[in-house]
Image (tube, rainbow, N blue to C red):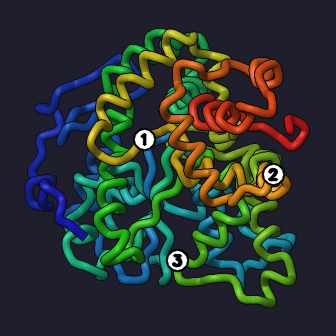
């Protein structure tokens, strides 16, 4: 992996009180370092990670921007990597007793460096630290720092989830959605700007995709919601513990998805009590869906935030919109039979429709009713492609 621009000696010499301060995210104080706004209370742990953390080649580091599916990914990774020791159906499985944050420790929460060192290999660890600020021991030497799994989420949903998370802690003392929105748009948020956090890991994944694909796995929260079983298989293979044929036949993958589901986890006893750094365990669970931002942000707010992210990401090769492969996957699940009936080659048609969709944004439908009103034999497929690409509207078989 490429070395980060901040070496470990520099990090250990930081005078936290001298860093730029942001006070408008109570109860946290944020300090700007290396282009990112970090919680002041976590900076000693970040510095400790740089000076004391000793990575192992077998480590799996789960990285994320806050409120992007971190808790879910921790549960899935822990249950997958430890499924032999802790079968997912076992009544005494750790996830039935403990919060996923108890099972997978944060790199920056170990201020003294001894908790993580005591864990047996292979370790599953987690972090919100941006890629460019990770300890050099993780990023500098190929193969020695273990593997990184990064999960990203639409910034609008990440913002809404973060706001509710803080509101559960402070109730009426929390800032308003409008205040939180302005801070988020300015990048002055936990480990923000969010888009810079995401693109740091994305660029590392892109660089490694051909030469060293085993080092960084990049996941999208929305894709995981659509296909949790397929993504758990991908996660297991990346972590070096792919499911065997017998495990597949026994439904182990589905069992892991089931024990790690939002409804299951939030109702476990371990998540109804206890806390993590003064946040009750129950605050880590809300809806766990994609698109809930539309219930809390105005269209103008959404458009503004989308444009800020789009401008910041230009030239990186990354977009928060559904990518080409995601659109093709949608066709595979809901449209391949129709394509076959029309005598169309599925691969060629899907790519053609993506090109048409990208040129037809001005005619984008705004609702499922719009889709129903505009489908006809002549323009059905280009219209649906535009809808799925731009609006991310899920179109089921009934539409056809």
Earlier sequence position, callout 1 versus callout 2: 1
Q: Which residue is drawn at 58% across and 69% down?
A: 235
Direction from residue 187 to residue 89 in the image, left or right: right
Badge 1 marks a residue whose secondary structure is: loop
Label 1 close to label 2 by CB (< 8 Å) = no
Earlier sequence position, callout 3 versus callout 2: 3
- The numbered mark at residue 239 is 3
Quadrant (top left, top right, bottom left, bottom right) of the N terminus = bottom left
- The numbered mark at residue 204 is none
Closer to the camera in the image, 92 or 293: 293
Q: How far apart are marks 3 and 1 (CA)?
A: 26 Å
Mark 1 is surrounded, within 10 Å at the Cα level, by few (under 14), some (14 to 19) or many (20 or more) other residues, namely some
- The numbered mark at residue 319 is 1
Mark 3 is surrounded, within 10 Å at the Cα level, by few (under 14), some (14 to 19) or many (20 or more) other residues, namely many
- Give the answer, above or below, for where 281 lies relative to 131: above
Direction from residue 159 to residue 337 in the image, left or right: right
Q: Residue at x 59, y 83 (%)?
A: 241
- Give the answer, above or below, for where 311 lies relative to 217: above
Place of residue 355 in the rendered image (x, y in percent of width and height, measured from the top left): 51, 42
Mark 2 is surrounded, within 10 Å at the Cα level, by few (under 14), some (14 to 19) or many (20 or more) other residues, namely few
Direction from residue 265 to residue 329 in the image, left or right: left
Q: Distance between the residues labelled 3 and 2?
A: 41 Å
Place of residue 209 in the rendered image (x, y in percent of width and height, measured from the top left): 37, 69
| Residue 240 shows up from this direction | yes
- The numbered mark at residue 342 is 2
Q: Quadrant of residue 294?
A: top right
Badge 2 marks a residue whose secondary structure is: loop
Q: Quadrant of residue 344?
A: bottom right
Badge 3 marks a residue whose secondary structure is: loop
| Residue 176 shows up from this direction | no
């Amino acid at each position: 992996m490429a070395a980060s621009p901040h070496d470990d000696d520099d990090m250990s010499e930081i005078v936290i009180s001298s860093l730029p301060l942001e006070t408008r995210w109570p109860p946290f104080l944020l300090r700007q370092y290396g282009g990112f706004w970090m919680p002041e209370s976590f900076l000693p742990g970040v510095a400790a990670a740089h000076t004391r953390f000793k990575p192992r080649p077998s480590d799996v580091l789960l990285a994320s921007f806050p409120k992007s599916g971190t808790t879910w990914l921790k549960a899935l990774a822990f249950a997958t990597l430890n499924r032999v020791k802790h079968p997912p159906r076992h009544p005494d499985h750790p996830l039935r007793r403990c919060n996923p944050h108890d099972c997978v420790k944060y790199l920056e929460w170990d201020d003294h460096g001894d908790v993580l060192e005591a864990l047996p290999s292979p370790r599953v660890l987690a972090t919100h630290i941006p890629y460019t600020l990770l300890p050099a021991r993780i990023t500098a030497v190929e193969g020695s720092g273990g593997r990184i799994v990064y999960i990203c989420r639409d910034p609008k949903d990440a913002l809404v989830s973060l706001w509710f998370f803080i509101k559960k802690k402070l109730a009426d003392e929390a800032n308003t959605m409008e205040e939180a929105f302005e801070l988020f748009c300015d990048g002055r948020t936990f480990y923000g700007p969010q888009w810079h956090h995401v693109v740091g890991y994305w660029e590392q994944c892109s660089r490694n995709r051909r030469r060293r694909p085993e080092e960084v796995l990049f996941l999208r929260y929305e894709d995981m919601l659509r296909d949790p079983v397929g993504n758990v298989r991908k996660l297991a293979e990346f972590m070096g513990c792919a499911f065997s044929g017998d495990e597949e036949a026994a439904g182990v993958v589905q069992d892991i998805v089931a024990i790690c589901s939002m409804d299951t986890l939030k109702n476990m006893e371990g998540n109804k009590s206890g806390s993590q750094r003064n946040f009750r365990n129950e605050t880590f669970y809300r809806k766990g869906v994609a698109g809930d931002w539309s219930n809390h942000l105005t269209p103008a707010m959404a458009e503004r935030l989308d444009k800020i992210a789009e401008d910041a990401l230009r030239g990186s090769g990354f977009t928060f919109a559904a990518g080409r492969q995601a659109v093709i996957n949608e066709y595979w699940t809901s449209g391949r039979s129709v394509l076959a009936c029309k005598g169309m080659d599925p691969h060629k048609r899907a790519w053609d429709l993506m090109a048409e969709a990208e040129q037809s944004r001005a005619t984008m439908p705004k609702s499922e009713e719009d889709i129903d009103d505009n489908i006809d034999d002549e323009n059905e497929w280009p219209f649906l492609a535009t809808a799925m690409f731009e609006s991310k509207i899920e179109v089921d078989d009934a539409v056809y």
